[in-house]
Image: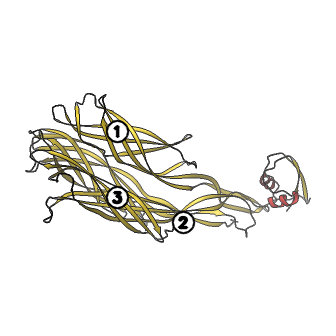
Amino acid sequence: MEFNFKKTPLKIISKALDTVSEQPVDMDFILPDYCPDIEKILRCKMSPKIYNRNISGGQLQVDGTTVVTVLYVTSQNKIRACEQNLPFSGTFQVSDSPENSVIETWAKPEYVNCRALSPRRLAVHGAFSLYGKVLCKSETELCSPNETENLECKTKNIKAATVTALCQDIFSAGDEISISNKPPIEVIIDSNVKANITDYRIIPDKLMVNGELNVKLLYLSDVEKGELHQIDYIIPFSQVVDCTGLTEDLTVSPELNLLSYDVRLKSDLLAETPVADVDAKLSITVFGYNSMEVPIITDAYSTEFVTDINSEIISTTSDIEIIKDTFMQKEEISLEGTNISSIIDLSNEYCTLSPIISEDGLILNSKLNICILGNDSENNPVYLERTIEFPKPLNFEKPFNNVEKFNSSIVSISYRIGDNNNLELRIEVRYSLTLTNIEKNSAIVKAFADEDNKIQKDNCALTLYFAEKGESLWDIAKEYNTKQQSIYDENSLEQDILDSAKMLLIPTV
């Protein structure tokens, strides 16, 4: 006979897909007519952009374009740039076809090599990693005692997080960049756009999100003179995300992903000079968690029949906390042997985060690249890249044993060339962490009574038992096939573990 347990439903995030594939990038192209000849290549930058993604026929299809920007020097010792686009498409097999799922995709450049086959012909070879995730809500069940069953159960209360809300919205944000206090834009040499959430507000079944696009442009104001200028611009945006089940009492984690962006010059008949038009495609994924206390069965037996139990190790998530903050980091880069006398532009393309939990707390190992465009003492353009790695220890009041999600970005970099030919940097890093505690417990999931194997009982009503300090009344009751509560009542006890040695009366049931 199988005993029936109560089933407590627990909604969790499951992964129908979590994979990555390498996408090759191979180009051989000729410069457009408006680009002057190449004398020397300074830099080759690869920017994969995702324009479309959808699930159909058990497959995740991701389409986009890889933008390759080549920064070079002309025979007149001027800096110019050319750009080439290469479409890409990635297909991933999804294990299930889940309903109400969310898609997370992003691309990370791995390497790119560029060489000039002639003053007007370029060959580019590289690769980037295309990541694909499909997440959905699924339901599991935790077993708890059923009072109608004649089964003794040892229980333990655990905290478990259940996913109440999961939703996603894809939208566009952008604006025109008008320059009033800087020279006008004639040609855009390079662009970089980053996005982040500044704040959000929860109302029933909706999340009101405010954020900003951080736009950085390197441009020519006078092509003939080759005058380079920079501009940093912030474009605010807001979006209302419909999210069924979202309430103010939930722990909410909104995640913003910049899928793609375009920056182009726009001629306005009413404007004296061209303006830059920024158009970004963004994805917001919202996770809403609710914490509850659930009893699980850790041991069980029947007082009448020999009992067979099946147990499993169950893993539950508790103590979810979302941390969003920034910190300042001072670093130095040696310019020895580079002959850089002045800096035209200093930028950052990537910042990766590797959180490590140790006995001393949480350490964020950050890794980022610094891209430096400058001039040497003879006013010749020079370009170099440096990689910086540094640990950042963080302390929290509550200990955590798992980092569920994490990301980081560079807010700003200020610099100064020191007297010792070092580049002194002040880097502001923004990070976001979802910290949790993962608890593993052995829990009973099934119990069977062998009705053909009845437990033989003694004829006496009470048994004397000398118990040692630290013994468990549960273990004693199980050994004598009686009820734990009966031992409590007979001996006027209230706790399972004995704090001293004593004689016990064990009743027969």
Cα distance between the residues tagged 3 and 2: 26 Å
Question: How far apart are the two marked residues, 1 and 2, measured between alpha carbons?
Answer: 42 Å
- Residue 473 in percent (x, y) is at 80, 53
Is the residue under label 2 in contact with that under label 3 (CB below 8 Å)?
no
**Among the 4 quarters of the image, the one containing residue 451:** bottom right
Rounded to the nearest whole Å, what is the CA distance between mark 1 and mark 3?
24 Å
User: Is 120 located above or below residue 176 in the figure?
Assistant: above
Amino acid type, mark 2: Asp
- Residue type at numbered disc 3: Glu
**Mark 3 crowd level (few <14, some 14–19, many ≥20, 10 Å Cα):** some
Q: Which mark is residue 452?
A: none
Residue position marked by numbered label 2 in the rendering: 249
**Farthest residue toward the front?**
181
**Residue drawn 54% across the image and 47% down it:** 396
For label 3, the SS is strand
Mark 1, mark 2: which one is toward the viewer?
A: 1
> Is residue 91 at all visible to an observer of this figure?
no
- Residue ID for mark 1: 425
- Tag 3 residue: 212
